Image: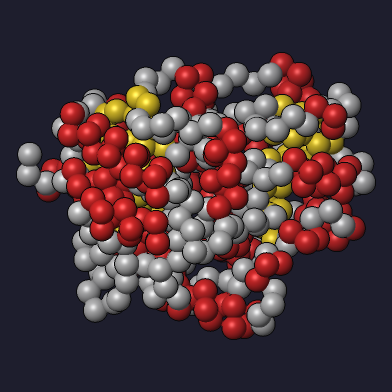
Amino acid sequence: MICLMPHCGFLSSTSRMLEIYHALRHRRVPARIATHGGTYERVLREVGVPYDQVGPRMTESRCARFIRDEIGMGFVGQSMYTDDELRQYVRAEVAYFRRHRVRVVVTGFTLTTLLSTRLAGAHLVTEHAGCWVPPTYERGLLPAPSQRRFSFLPAGLLRRLSNTLPNRVPFYCGGFNRVAAELGAPRVPSLAALVLGDLTLVPEVPEVLGIPAEELAAWHPRGRPGYRPQTRLRYSGPLYARLDVAMPPRVAEFLRRPDPIVYVALNSTEPELVRKVVGAVRALSVRVLVAATAHDLADLDDGEQVVVGGVLPSHRVMPAVRLAITAGGQGSVQTAMAAGTPVLGIPLQPEQDLNLALLERVGAARLMPLRHAATSRMTAVAGQMLADDSYRRAAARIRAAYDRTDGPGNAAEAILDLLERRPA
C-alpha cells in the first residue's frame, strides 16, 4: 500500500499530493491519503478525495504557527513541532502504517514521517525540498537569502554559507533527534537530511534547474557527511495544483475583460503584506485579482479594479493574466510557468529565493526583496515587467518544456519503481 501524507497547513503541499494521488489512481494503483489536518484539509473534502485523520488534528491557528516556525522562517534551534507533538504524531503514524500495511509513504512536508517510516519499516518519498537538493548547493547555485533577518552578513558570505552548510548543521533537528532517541529511530544528521527522503523527487525540469537528469540521478551520499545512506534523487518534472474547484462567476467575468490583469497570490503570508502589494500594483491602473485563501481581504474588493477570490483554480487563472505576484513557492511559480506567465516574486524564505533566482536566470521572473514590497520600487518593477515582452517569451520557453513533461505521471512511476524493489 502507498500512503500520501500532505501537510494541510500548505496549499502547495496539499495540491501536489492530490496530483500524485490522481496519477497513481489513473494507473489503477491503490493509495491512501492521510493527514494531521489543517487549514487546507477542506480542499481534500471539496475535491471529494477520501482521507484519514492521523494523530491530533492541526487547527488553523496551529498551522499558522507552524508556518512561522518552518525551515528558513523560524529560529533554527526549534523543530516546528513540540517534543510532545512529535511523539504523538510519530506513534499515531506508525500504528496507521502498520494497520494498513503501508510500504511507501509519500509526503509533502509532514516531517514526522522521517521517524515513523523508519519505525514502521516503510520507504519515504519526499518532494518538498523542491530544487533545494545536494547537487544544487554542491554547484554553488543557492543565492544569498534576501530576507532582512540575514542582512547583518555580507551577501558573498551569505551565499557561501548557504551552499556549504546544509549537510553540516543540525538546524531544526533537535526535537526530532530527542524523540528519535526515545523511540529507537535513527537520528536526523543534518538540515539537509531533514528534507530528503529515501527517494527525493525533484519537481522541476533540467532546463530550469540547470543540472542534467543523469547527473542528478547519479548523485550518491557516499563519502559526504550529514546524509542518510539510502538517499537518492530523481527528477519528476513540475508538480503544481490543478484543483478541481469551481471558478467563481464574478472572477470568471473579471478575467474576460480586455484590460491587463495582475494576479496576487500570496498564500502563506500575513494579510497586511497582501494589502500593501495590492496598493503598490493599483498605482499602475491595471486590474488586480487577489487569491485570499486563508485571510479575509474583502476590504480590498471594489468590484472594478480589484476583485478578491478564495481558493481559486490557479491553473485556469494564470493563462488569463499578464503577471503573477507570488511568494515564489514552487507550486505557484510552476503554475505560472505552465501558463507562460511571468512571475514577480516576494520570497519569504530561502527556498523561495532559489526558485526565483532560477527563473531570473532564464529571464522569466524578477525577485523583489520583502523590504521593498510596499514601495515605489514594487510599482516600477511590476510596470517594467508588464511592458517588456521578453519576460513572457522566456516564460513561454519554460511552458514548452513543461508541456513535454508529465510531472505527476513521472512521480507515480518513480514511486512504483521504489515499491517494486522492496520485498513484500
Q: Pinpoint residue 355: horizontal percent, then vertical percent.
A: 56, 58
Q: Is residue 109 above or below residue 244?
A: below
- For residue 265, which quarter of the picture? top right
Query: Does residue 390 appear left or right of residue 207 in this picture?
Result: right
Q: Pinpoint residue 259: horizontal percent, then vertical percent.
A: 84, 34
Residue drawn at the location 28% of the way across and 50% of the way down: 115
The outermost residue toward the left is 423
The quadrant in which the C terminus is found is top left
Residue 212 visible to an observer of this rendering: no
Q: Is residue 325 above or below residue 320?
A: below
Q: How many marks?
A: 0
- For residue 397, which quarter of the picture? bottom right
The quadrant in which the N terminus is found is top left
- For residue 199, which quarter of the picture? bottom left
Residue drawn at the location 27% of the way across and 29% of the way down: 31
Residue drawn at the location 59% of the way across and 83% of the way down: 157
Q: How is the image coloured?
A: secondary structure
Q: Pinpoint residue 409: horizontal percent, then vertical percent.
A: 34, 39
Query: Does residue 412 appear left or right of residue 280 in this picture?
Result: left
Q: Is residue 168 above or below residue 129?
A: below
Q: Pinpoint residue 76: horizontal percent, then vertical percent.
A: 51, 64
For this rendering, which residue is in front, 241 or 121?
A: 121
